[in-house]
Image (cartoon, rainbow, N blue to C red):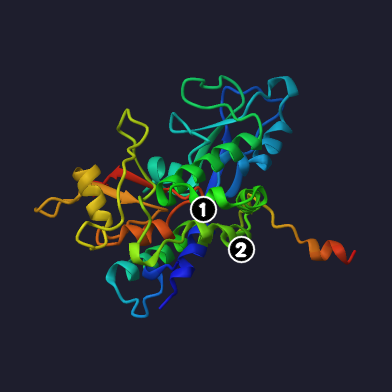
Amino acid sequence: QSMSLSVSPAQTAAWRKQIFEQLSERSKREMDNFRHYEQAIEQTVWVKKGTM
Amino acid sequence: MADDKDVLRDVWFGRIPTCFTLYQDEITEREAEPFYLLLPRVSYLPLVTDKVRKHFQKVMKPDDVGEMWFEYEGTPLKWHYPIGLLFDLYASNTTLPWSIFVHFKNFPQQDLLHCPSNSVIEAHFMSSIKEADALKHKGAVVNEMQKKDHKQLWMGLQNDKFDQFWAMNRKLMEYPTEEGGFRYIPFRIYQVTSNRPFIQKLFRPVASDGCPHTLGDLLKEVFPAAIPQNDGQKKYQVMIHGIEPMLETPIQWLSEHLSYPDNFLHISIIPAPSD
């Protein structure tokens, strides 16, 4: 079993490049100006609690 | 060049900045300030809005607090659709933050399912995963998993744990090399302007001549109007996770990398902006 489409060494296809670029643009658009907003799900820091 | 695995992280950690405002008809004891939150695109509204409920409950009498539901520009938001899909479908190309009304009364029974607890979301999520695996592997992978493995998928989503989720989800993404992909691609196509909730058909990732099917091939078969005409005019945007993949993108790759945690590709087709 493998994921043959995912491991192609020459990842230069235009469609793939375009997806990377668009995801990066999406992050800028949807997240960069809003980093001061609260996260809906808090990540629990159990390690810190363990040392209390 | 980024790695394909980075796409999985980008998809998982997508967030939509959202402004929740209490609907004007709700009765409060003092003024209700709006509440701002980053919502995970891949999650479900009732799973990530505890803080919203608590915020508004502080200014309301307990008797006035019924089941919470959400509305965007007159449309009740279905909790059983992933948040990213709701945003792409109804609010793409609008100014951020996404502005949602919060209601605690007049639950729209005809539009929304009740969601009395997280176990209802879990049941919906797991049934979607099972349906997707039935399409991909005749259900073989999900049936081989143990109950704790199913829990790992759910807890990964519930607690926003990417590694926990993908340690198990990768099994659902495998396929025999010689077949070049899944048996069928789990996908759903949504449109705002349709009476049908969505389009879902059997579609193979590889053509009978062995060539990989693309997103364009899928659209040609199930929604040809979304393909730009010869004059180059684009009538529709085809959105997945807030982006518009090229029509040449192999559908198998999309299924492996741009599916939601429920293992479906949720594709929104929206009218292209006229500017």
Tell how many labels. Answer: 2
Quarter of image, res A48: bottom right
Give the labeled residue for mark 2. B163
Quarter of image, res A51: bottom right
Give the x, y percent position of residue A27: 47, 62
Residue B3 in the image: above or below residue B53? below
Give the labeled residue for mark 1. B141
Packing grade of label 2 (10 A; few <14, some 14-19, many >=20) is: few
Give the x, y percent position of residue B85: 44, 45
B248 or B79, which is in the foreground?
B248
Check chain identity for marks 1 and 2: say if they share one: yes
Give me the residue at 46% from left, 63% from top: A28
Q: Can residue B200 be seen in this snapshot? A: yes
Q: CA distance from mark 1 to mark 2?
A: 19 Å
Q: Amino acid at mark 1?
A: Val
Asked which secondary structure carries label 1, the reply is helix
Q: Which chain letter matches label 1?
A: B
B213 or A51, which is in the foreground?
B213
Give me the residue at 21% from left, 46% from top: B221
Give me the residue at 46% from left, 42% from top: B131
Q: Which chain letter matches label 2?
A: B
Q: Amino acid at mark 2?
A: Asp
Give the x, y percent position of residue A31: 51, 59
B166 or B106, which is in the foreground?
B166
Mark closer to the chain start, 1 or 2: 1
Residue B144 in the image: above or below residue B68? below
Give the x, y percent position of residue B8: 49, 63
Residue B101: mark in rendering: none
